[in-house]
Image (cartoon, rainbow, N blue to C red):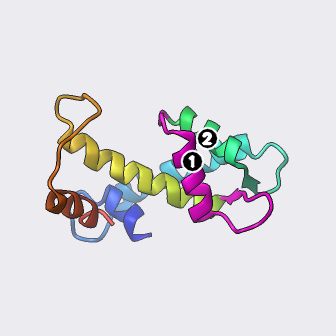
Amino acid sequence: CLMMINMFDKTKSGRIDVYGFSALWKFIQQWKNLFQQYDRDHSGSISYTELQQALSQMGYNLSPQFTQLLVTRYCPRSASPAMQLDRFIQVCTQLQVLTEAFREKDTAVQGNIRLSFEDFVTMTASRM
């Protein structure tokens, strides 16, 4: 929740106003709609393949290995792990926050940045 609030906290006060809440609510609804679009069997969860497709539709060009890492990290252990909506929103939030942090450093829009370790942990810790 704090990460989502921080996405829309323009004053860095740890709070959002009604406009920030409205923007956050729209993001959550977009993620929910996308999740439901890929939850074709209406089971309340999406598979690895469906997650890969959803992330691709969101504009992320992520490797199958990274998507598998997300499934391993965020899905219950079972014969056929699948991601539920709350975990999907958590993943989307983290990707959004990290993408914004990356874009701040990628001023030439090349898709690559060079960071010291301290810059990296500062960049991520300030957003988590």
Give SS at disc 1: helix
Work out which quarter of the rendered image holds the C terminus and state it: bottom left
Q: Which mark is residue 52?
A: 2
Q: CA distance from mark 2 to mark 1?
A: 6 Å
Q: Which residues are magenta?
A: 59-84
Give SS at disc 2: helix
Residue at 56%, 33% (x, y): give it. Answer: 57
Q: Which residue is mark 1?
A: 67
**Residue 82, how many percent across, how many down?**
72, 57
Residue flagged by tag 2: what amino acid is it? Gln
The correct choice, above or below, for 12 with respect to 112 in the image is below
**Residue 31, how many percent across, how many down?**
57, 48
Left or right of 3 in this view: 47: right
Can residue 19 be seen at all in this image of the molecule?
yes
Q: Is residue 70 magenta?
A: yes
**Residue 10, how many percent across, how many down?**
24, 57
Residue at 26%, 67% (x, y): give it. Answer: 125
